[in-house]
């Protein structure tokens, strides 16, 4: 007997056993199978798939259930049963066959949270099979999956065996990137033995990440298998661009598991590694290795890179590099860091081992330890095998620091170490120890702020030019022999500050110690302390100096604070600029001392300003000048002969003991403009623009010196000035002058200003100043927000600047970083200019030239290698830092002048076409030092990049690739690297 009912809500059925719906595929909005592309259309339909369903925060109901009555509520709440609710416009139940048939728009069945919706649904309680038909059949199970299973036609599902068969299915998988999967025939089954995983099978299916209704690309596969929240595999797969097949792959797979998993790393190589297009092309591959997920707190990976040794050259013998990385992080113990190691072996036998350790640990709220250690065994290989211009000049730096607090005192202990690329010199500073105590109020009228610091700086294997390069001796066989000298320097300094504030009086006290040792032979011209004409040259195997000093002074309370701000002071200062106690190699290691004298001072720091009417967009100008004017007086003093002898100075013409009658001036100048505004609200803040800001370093004039020498009375050796302006975004400039030729404490010094350094930098873009105005004239819109400056600091989008970081130096990180399209949809240019030169020496002292040509004489027989050596030595980042001694008469290190211009430009041809160009030009060498060029095309699902880089070491690389946005390791790549290094 058949009963036919037309109901809006059908009766609920209850089953004793709880249900278990198998679908585990993540939820997505319905998607039609990919039809053939209409070749008549000029471009595909760019209408996106409905993304609202993919947003868990915007989940929509598949069916609108009618409200239930009291009988229905009572049935569904009966304990021990799982209720099945169904709904349709027409419901037919066959009691003989126990078949339930639902029809209508939309017919639906739900049990717990599982919902099945279709045009018609047939459920057989005997076979436990549900069959749903319709244009769109949707199965949703939010407890076990995030995406809907969508069928275009029919879905048959066995409730008891948890198996289903569907036609024209489509769904999506989210693994960081959303993949859309569809198939003409498919089946899925739930495996209760493996945590109720849903296994999905499909034939003649497609996979794509393009969300267009007609995808720009897709993978066509005969067989597809997906295990929910585990893995997706397809075989064989053909990549289609539009409707054109471009690549056949035996299989593709995607790991869909969340969290970290051990597995094989994705190798990096180009098409040219498989099909060499030139007989001179050198194959290379990277990132061949394995990743280990050791625990929840750490992971590791091991990989190696390889470059072919076929057709090897002297500078490019081929190599293999092993990389290891270990990372750890314990959040509950506030510990994180990484340990990296690399071993670089060249085919010619040269090797380089690099180690990097980064660690951060907080023992408590006031105790922390941080370390960033980098070390390489061969800096020459580190420099000559890189293609990144920044890494050619970047130093290999290490830092470590421990900080804690004991009571109110903050204690720090740390150190630094620096290696220089292509050089053996090492600079290190350890230990650096400091104690800083906040102001302690010992009484209402007494404050004390003590502090202590200790530091040791060393320079090992100093490779700067010197008089003595080799040490000659007789070996064990009685034959003359030689060995290269190692020159080392050490500077140790310590200070103890104990300032006191007594009422309105500030009493400064500091005790200072410094010790210097230069373990390198040097020729010093020794002068007679009483007769400057008597000079003799002596070679010292090492030079040293130790200085002890005590500085004290009292600053009285200020008066006229609202206007002139006058502050008197009294201090006791040394007659000579050096410390009170001193010993050097010139004194035979004995301590000698000088005298102190009282210095009375008066300083004033008023602020003078004036307002001027504006014009145009400026309502008013404000001009302010803040001078700091001080006057010091000290009586005539005497200095001992032993002290001058220790400094290798003569009494004749010595001006340090003259009475001081000195006036000192420093100046700060600011010109600001207040812009007009249309905002008349009371809270509106008028915009201000700094037209020009200038700062002048202190300049001192001594009237007693001018009277004594009958020449200039200026006693400042150097003067500098810096200036900035908002008219040119990011603009900053500086200049420094040397005022005197010769020792400023000698009457032989001549006042001859000489420019030593000058620098300038600025950033402009399409929205800056005049460029924005021109854009408006020609009808192009300019953003109103921040019209002057879009970005003045480098970002992660700067093309090759971030390809390889200077640290860490080991491991596989930051290798072949791909480049994004710059953020700004305009153009931007950053220019930096710097120029430095030395004042030419005078007299007949010893002059040593620190010239790259002198270091490359051994390669002079080979002109090509000789020029490469000069280019490499000229790029030394530490060139020109000489060894300074306390005593006079040492050699003068003369370095060549430098004039350098660096530029970085980014620009957009179209919203998707962008480019960047960075370069460095040396005006002295009259050539470019490096180039970094990048052209980028952002496609809908692909990124195309052309890149060329030439580093200062002569290496250059050309790279072109097209990478899939969803899977960047899938790319068509051409990468040619050419080495032009020299052998050490």
Image (cartoon, rainbow, N blue to C red):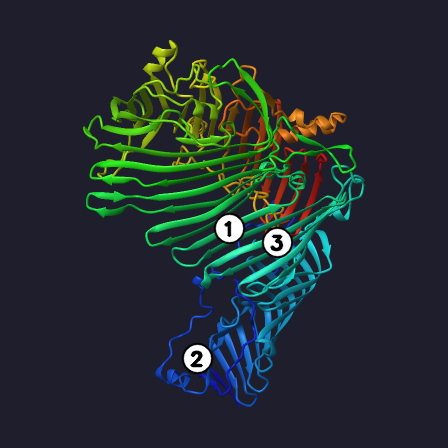
Residue at the extreme top: 710
Q: Within 10 Å of the Cα at label 2, are there few (<14), some (14-19), or many (20+) other Cα atoms?
A: few
Residue 7: assigned label: 2
Residue at numbered disc 1: 371
- Mark 2 or 1, nearer chain start: 2
- Mark 2 or 3, nearer chain start: 2
Q: CA distance from mark 3 to mark 1?
A: 35 Å
Task: Say which of 280 and 237 sits in front.
Answer: 280
- Please identify, in this view, whether the residue under mark 2 or under mark 1 is nearer the observer: 1
Q: Within 10 Å of the Cα at label 3, are there few (<14), some (14-19), or many (20+) other Cα atoms?
A: few
Q: Are marks 2 and 3 in contact (CB under 8 Å)?
A: no
Residue for point 66% across, 44% down: 961
Image quadrant in which the C terminus is located: top right
- Please identify, in this view, whether the residue under mark 3 or under mark 1 is nearer the observer: 1
Q: Are marks 2 and 1 in contact (CB under 8 Å)?
A: no
- Please identify, in this view, whether the residue under mark 2 or under mark 3 is nearer the observer: 3
Residue 694: assigned label: none
Q: Are marks 3 and 1 in contact (CB under 8 Å)?
A: no
In the rendering, at what x and y percent does residue 381 appear? 67, 41
| Res. 124 image quadrant | bottom right
Residue for point 45% across, 20% down: 737
| Res. 666 image quadrant | top left
Q: CA distance from mark 2 to mark 1?
A: 73 Å
Left or right of 335 in this view: 784: left
Residue at numbered disc 3: 967
The secondary structure type at the circle numbered 3 is: loop
In the rendering, at what x and y percent does residue 552 appear? 31, 34
The secondary structure type at the circle numbered 1 is: strand
Question: 187 above or below 180?
Answer: below
Residue for point 56% across, 61% down: 298
């Amino acid at each position: 007997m058949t009963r036919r009912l037309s109901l809006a809500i059908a009766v609920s059925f209850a089953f004793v056993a709880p249900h278990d719906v198998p679908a585990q595929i993540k939820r997505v909005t319905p998607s039609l199978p990919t039809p053939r592309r209409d070749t008549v259309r000029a471009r595909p339909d760019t209408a996106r798939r409905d993304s609202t369903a993919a947003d868990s925060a915007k989940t929509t109901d598949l069916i609108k259930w009618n409200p239930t009555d009291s009988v229905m509520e009572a049935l569904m709440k009966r304990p021990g049963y799982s209720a099945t609710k169904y709904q349709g416009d027409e419901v037919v139940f066959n009691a003989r066959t126990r078949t339930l048939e639902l029809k209508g728009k939309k017919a639906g069945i739900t049990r717990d949270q599982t919902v099945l919706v279709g045009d018609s649904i047939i459920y057989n309680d005997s076979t436990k099979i549900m069959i749903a038909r319709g244009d769109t059949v949707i199965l949703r199970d939010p407890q076990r999956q995030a995406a809907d299973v969508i069928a275009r036609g029919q879905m048959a599902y066995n409730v008891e065996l948890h198996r289903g068969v569907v036609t024209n299915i489509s769904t999506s998988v989210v693994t960081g990137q959303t993949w859309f999967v569809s198939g003409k025939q498919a089946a899925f089954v739930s495996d209760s033995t493996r945590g109720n995983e849903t296994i999905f099978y499909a034939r003649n299916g497609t996979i794509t990440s393009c969300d267009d209704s007609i995808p720009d690309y897709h993978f066509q596969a005969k067989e597809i298998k997906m295990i929910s929240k585990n893995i997706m595999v397809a075989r064989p797969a053909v990549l289609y661009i539009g409707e054109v097949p471009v690549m056949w792959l035996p299989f593709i797979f995607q790991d869909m598991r969340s969290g970290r998993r051990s597995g094989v790393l994705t190798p990096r190589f180009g098409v040219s590694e498989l099909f060499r297009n030139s007989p001179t092309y050198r194959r290379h591959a990277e990132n061949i290795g394995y990743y280990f997920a050791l625990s929840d707190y750490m992971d590791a990976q091991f990989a190696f890179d390889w470059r072919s040794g076929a057709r090897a050259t002297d500078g490019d013998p081929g190599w293999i590099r092993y990389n290891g990385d270990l990372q750890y992080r314990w959040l509950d113990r506030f510990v994180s860091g990484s340990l990296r190691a690399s071993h670089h072996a060249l085919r010619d036998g040269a090797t380089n081992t690099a180690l990097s350790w980064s660690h951060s640990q907080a023992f408590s709220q006031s105790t922390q330890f941080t370390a960033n250690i980098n070390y390489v065994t061969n800096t020459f290989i580190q420099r000559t095998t890189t293609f990144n211009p920044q890494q050619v000049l970047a130093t290999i730096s290490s830092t470590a620091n421990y900080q804690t607090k004991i009571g109110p005192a903050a204690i720090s202990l740390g150190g630094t170490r620096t290696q220089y690329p292509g050089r053996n010199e090492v600079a290190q500073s350890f230990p650096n120890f400091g104690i800083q105590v906040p102001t302690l109020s010992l009484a209402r009228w007494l404050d004390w702020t003590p502090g202590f610091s200790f530091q040791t700086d060393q320079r090992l294997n100093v490779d700067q030019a010197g008089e003595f390069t080799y040490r000659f001796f007789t070996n064990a066989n009685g034959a003359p022999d030689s060995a290269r000298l190692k020159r080392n320097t050490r500077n140790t300094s310590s200070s103890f500050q104990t300032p006191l504030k007594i009422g309105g009086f500030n009493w400064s006290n500091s005790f200072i110690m410094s010790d210097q040792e230069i373990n390198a032979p040097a020729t010093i011209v020794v002068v007679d302390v009483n007769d400057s004409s008597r000079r003799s040259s002596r070679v010292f195997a090492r030079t040293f100096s130790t200085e002890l000093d005590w500085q004290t002074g009292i600053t009285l309370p200020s008066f006229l604070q609202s206007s002139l701000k006058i502050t008197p002071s009294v201090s006791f200062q040394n007659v000579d600029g050096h410390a009170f106690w001193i010993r050097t190699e010139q004194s035979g290691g004995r301590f000698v001392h000088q005298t102190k004298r009282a210095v009375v001072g008066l300083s004033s720091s008023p602020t003078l300003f004036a307002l001027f009417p504006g014009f145009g967009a400026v309502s008013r100008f404000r001009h302010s000048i803040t001078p700091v004017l001080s006057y010091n007086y000290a009586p005539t003093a005497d200095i001992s002969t032993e002290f001058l002898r220790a400094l290798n100075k003569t009494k004749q013409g010595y001006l340090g003991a003259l009475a001081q009658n000195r006036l000192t001036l420093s100046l700060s100048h600011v010109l600001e403009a207040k812009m007009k505004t249309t905002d008349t609200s009371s809270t509106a803040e008028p915009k201000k623009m700094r037209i020009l800001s200038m700062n002048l370093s202190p300049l001192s004039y001594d009237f007693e010196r001018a009277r004594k020498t009958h020449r200039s009375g200026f006693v400042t050796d150097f003067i500098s000035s810096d200036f900035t302006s908002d008219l040119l975004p990011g603009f900053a400039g500086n200049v420094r002058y040397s005022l005197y030729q010769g020792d400023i404490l000698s009457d032989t010094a001549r006042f001859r200003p000489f420019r030593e350094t000058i620098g300038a930098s600025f950033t402009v873009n399409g929205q800056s100043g005049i460029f924005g105005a021109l854009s408006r004239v020609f009808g192009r819109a300019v953003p109103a927000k921040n019209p002057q400056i879009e970005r003045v600091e480098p970002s992660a989008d700067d093309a090759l600047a971030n390809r390889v970081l200077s640290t860490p130096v080991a491991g596989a990180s930051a290798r072949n970083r791909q480049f994004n399209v710059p953020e700004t949809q305009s153009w931007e240019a950053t220019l930096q200019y710097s120029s430095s030169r030395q004042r030419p020496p005078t007299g007949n002292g010893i002059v040593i030239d620190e010239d790259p040509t002198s270091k490359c004489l051994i390669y002079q027989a080979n002109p090509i290698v000789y020029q490469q050596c000069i280019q490499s030595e000229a790029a030394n980042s530490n060139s020109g830092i000489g060894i300074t001694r306390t005593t006079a008469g040492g050699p003068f290190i003369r370095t060549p002048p430098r004039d350098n211009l660096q530029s970085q430009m980014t620009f957009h041809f179209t919203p998707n076409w962008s480019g960047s160009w960075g370069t460095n030009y040396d005006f002295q060498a009259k050539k470019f030092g490096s180039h970094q060029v990048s052209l980028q095309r952002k496609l809908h699902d692909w990124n195309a990049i052309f890149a060329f880089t030439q580093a200062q070491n002569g290496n250059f690389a050309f790279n072109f690739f097209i990478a899939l946005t969803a899977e960047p390791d899938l790319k068509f790549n051409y990468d040619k690297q050419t080495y032009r290094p020299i052998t050490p």
